[in-house]
Image: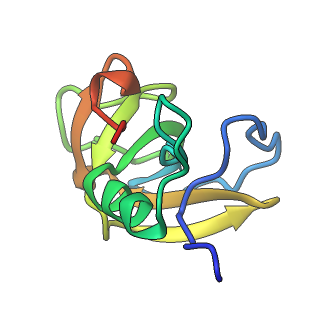
Amino acid sequence: MNKMETWATDDTIPTPKKLPQPVGYRILIRPVPVVEKTKGGIILTDKSREDQSYLNSIGQVIVMGPECYSDRKKPWCKVGDWILYGRYAGAKISVQNVKMVLINDDEVLGTLENPDIISRNI
């Protein structure tokens, strides 16, 4: 049985030191991985993980292009912030086997103090 491909990398793998520099108004994000098992230890099915992936497009801003929010008085986010973005937003890339997403600055839907405030447990 094939394991479902989720576009996130386990938190135990560090973010690479050498990263692509986004151009213009683009933002490089590291998505939060989906929960693989319940608090009780039950391993989730591929369908459950896929549903979770669909509902949770959360990531941390890693690098911002030089023109991000240049047309606004105040930026919506900054490097290190946790953000919400659309599931189909941006381009998915893999940097040294770490999955990342490159989005436009206007594709940020919201910011979070902590990604844990969004329920990811099933």
Colouring mode (rainbow / by chain / secondary structure / one colour): rainbow
Residue 1, percent from left and from top: 65, 83
Residue 40, percent from left and from top: 49, 30
Q: Using the image, determine if residue 119 lies above or below residue 30.
A: above
Q: Using the image, determine if residue 74 lies above or below residue 71.
A: above
Q: Residue at x 38, y 69 (%)?
A: 47
In this view, the residue in front, 74 or 19, is 19
Q: Residue at x 29, y 22 (%)?
A: 117
Q: Quadrant of the C terminus?
A: top left
Residue 23 visible in rendering: no
Identify the image quadrant of residue 98. Answer: bottom right
Farthest top residue in view = 113
Residue 93, percent from left and from top: 61, 68
Answer with left or right where residue 73 lies relative to residue 3. Answer: left
How many numbered discs, if any?
Answer: 0
In this view, the residue in front, 22 or 71, is 22
Answer with left or right where residue 90 lies relative to residue 109. Answer: right
Farthest bottom residue in view = 1
Q: Residue at x 48, y 48 (%)?
A: 34
Answer with left or right where residue 90 lies relative to residue 62. Answer: left
Answer with left or right where residue 111 lies relative to residue 14. Answer: left
Q: Residue at x 64, y 53 (%)?
A: 21
Identify the image quadrant of residue 59. Answer: top left
Residue 17 visible in rendering: yes
In this view, the residue in front, 63 or 94, is 94
In this view, the residue in front, 26 or 109, is 109
Q: Using the image, determine if residue 71 lies above or below residue 87.
A: above
Residue 102, percent from left and from top: 48, 60
